[in-house]
Image (cartoon, grey):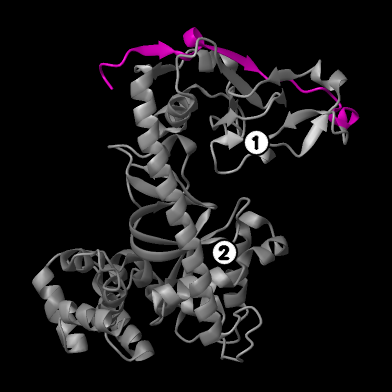
């Protein structure tokens, strides 16, 4: 791309802002002769806008911006910077910018893909103004530089990207069908988790899992994927973008606690970053992490979002459940230690460290308390917990044994293999092979 000339959008395209006749309801019409009124709700995952849900009368068009097939629309607020190619004519409100390739210098698909690229989004983001909602204006967009290869080269690039886009779309359809199959099999085996129609025994989620929100993360810390920003960042609606550093590693179900998709459940694997709007679910007892993920996913947690403020629901409702239990299974300090292990088992932790730096008590006393309450020493409990996590990680064939060891809290692979064999009577490699044969 270095040898391609760079041009400012404003030098090669007309850039104008839309206009909104007000009050808009006065200008909306059901007449077939009305003029298309183009809104963000008329878009989908494709690059084109092909129809509108509403039309306006000609008097409204005089107070708006008329656009034509072939023009580019760029959203300039909310999901700002998202481009679309028009296949219809109509009028746009002030939440849109129109880009018109006045000299026919661009293959429309090439310009679409470039405007959709993370590098362009970052340019827009660096220019955007606003508080909670970022906004672009015409002058900002005019000053953004884009590459200008020869038209035939643009067409070749766009054709390749079309094929890749088609493969991605096909893969999404396949994954959606697989999700339907998984749900059908899950329901067949365990019943509907909402109705519990198989009358299985139940427990409160807070009694068997630790739920903890991620850390406060500013929008400036989140960017598109590049060489520096490679760690996926989970927010309330799934992956928001990428950051420099991870806050977690391993396999965790994550529940969104805020936003339009509040209650959605994702499965994070490997190194990742969780924001304050994402709640990590960590089992305190032996549970198959993938089973837990699908259980939570099929429970339709969004139906609870009106029970309290959306952003506090997941954490607070479970905390309330825990507080209302008639009796605690363990001494409160031991319960805290179990939760601490669930969040920090990958680190080098010991009962002595906890006694000295967290509880400020004699380590021998804390060791006895832990053993009296749980029936096992802290070191044996920690090793057992790590081994359970290792079994879950071994389900992912793409992880090397050394990766599984590290993600389970062991920097020494041979030591990890030794402990695993002691726990399960076989090496991690043998365990994985046996699981694959069973599949």
**Which x, y percent locates residue 309?**
68, 56
**Residue 214 visible in the current orientation:** no
> Based on the displayed image, in which of its 4 quarters is residue 361 positioned?
bottom left
Quick check: marks 2 and 1 in contact, CB under 8 Å?
A: no
Q: Is residue 380 above or below residue 41?
A: below
Instruction: Say which of 312 and 259 sits in front.
Output: 259
Residue found farthest to the left: 414
Which residue is drawn at the image coordinates 80% and 32% (left, top)? Answer: 55
State which quarter of the image contains the N terminus: top left
Q: Is residue 33 left or right of residue 234?
A: right
Residue found farthest to the right: 26
Instruction: Kindly state the secondary structure of the residue where label 1 is placed.
Output: loop
Residue found farthest to the top: 11
Instruction: Say which of 170 and 274 sits in front.
Output: 170
**Which x, y percent locates residue 43?**
63, 39
Q: Earlier in the sequence, mark 2 or mark 1?
A: 1
Q: Which residues are magenta?
A: 1-28
Name the disc covering residue 315, or none: 2
Q: Is residue 203 left or right of residue 359?
A: right
State which quarter of the image contains the C terminus: bottom left
Name the disc covering residue 50, or none: 1
Which residue is drawn at the image coordinates 79% and 36% (left, top)? Answer: 54
Which residue is drawn at the image coordinates 64% and 88% (left, top)? Answer: 197
Q: Is residue 13 above or below residue 45?
A: above
Q: Is residue 227 left or right of residue 296?
A: left
Instruction: Say which of 94 and 157 sits in front.
Output: 157
Which residue is drawn at the image coordinates 57% and 72% (left, top)? Answer: 298
Q: CA distance from mark 2 to mark 1?
A: 42 Å
Name the disc covering residue 347, or none: none
> Based on the displayed image, in which of its 4 quarters is residue 18 positioned?
top right
Q: Residues within 10 Å of mark 1 (few under 14, many from 20)?
A: some
Question: Which circle, 2 or 1, is nearer the viewer?
Answer: 1
């Amino acid at each position: 791309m270095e040898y391609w000339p760079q041009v400012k959008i404003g030098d090669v395209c007309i850039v104008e802002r839309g206009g909104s006749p007000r009050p808009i309801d006065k200008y909306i019409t059901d007449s077939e002769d009305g003029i298309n009124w183009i809104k963000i709700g008329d878009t989908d995952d494709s690059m084109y806008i092909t129809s509108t849900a509403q039309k306006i009368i000609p008097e409204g068009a005089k107070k708006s911006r008329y656009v034509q097939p072939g023009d580019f629309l760029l959203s300039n607020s909310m999901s700002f910077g998202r481009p679309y190619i028009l296949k219809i004519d109509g009028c746009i409100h002030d939440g849109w910018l129109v880009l018109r390739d006045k000299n026919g210098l661009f293959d429309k698909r090439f310009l679409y893909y470039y405007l959709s690229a993370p590098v362009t989004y970052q340019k827009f983001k660096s220019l955007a103004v606003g508080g909670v909602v970022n906004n672009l204006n015409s002058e900002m967009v005019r000053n953004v530089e884009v590459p200008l290869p020869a038209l035939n080269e643009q067409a070749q690039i766009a054709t390749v990207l079309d094929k890749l886009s088609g493969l991605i779309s096909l893969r999404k359809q396949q994954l959606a069908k697989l999700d339907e199959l998984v749900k059908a099999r899950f329901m067949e085996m365990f019943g509907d988790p909402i109705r519990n129609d198989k009358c299985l025994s139940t427990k409160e989620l807070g009694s068997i899992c630790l739920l903890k929100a991620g850390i406060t993360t500013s929008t400036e810390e989140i960017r598109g994927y590049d060489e520096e920003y490679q760690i996926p960042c989970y927010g309330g609606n799934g992956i928001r973008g990428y950051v420099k550093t991870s806050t977690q590693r391993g396999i965790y179900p994550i529940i969104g606690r805020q936003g339009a998709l509040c209650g959605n459940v994702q499965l994070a694997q490997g190194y990742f970053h969780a924001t304050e709007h994402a709640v990590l679910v960590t089992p305190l007892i032996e549970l198959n992490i993938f089973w837990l993920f699908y259980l939570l996913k099929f429970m339709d947690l969004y139906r609870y979002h009106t029970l309290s403020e959306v952003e506090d629901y997941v954490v607070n409702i479970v905390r309330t459940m825990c507080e209302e239990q008639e009796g605690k299974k363990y001494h409160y300090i031991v319960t805290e230690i179990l939760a601490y292990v669930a969040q920090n088992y990958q680190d080098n932790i010991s009962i002595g460290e906890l006694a000295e730096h967290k509880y400020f008590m004699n380590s021998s006393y804390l060791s006895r308390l832990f053993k009296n309450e749980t029936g096992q020493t802290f070191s044996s409990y920690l090793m057992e917990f790590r081994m359970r996590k290792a079994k879950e990680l071994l389900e992912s064939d793409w992880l090397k044994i050394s990766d599984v060891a590290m993600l389970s809290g062991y920097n020494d692979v041979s030591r990890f293999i030794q402990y695993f064999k002691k726990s399960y009577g076989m090496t991690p490699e043998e365990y994985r092979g046996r699981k694959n044969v069973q599949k």
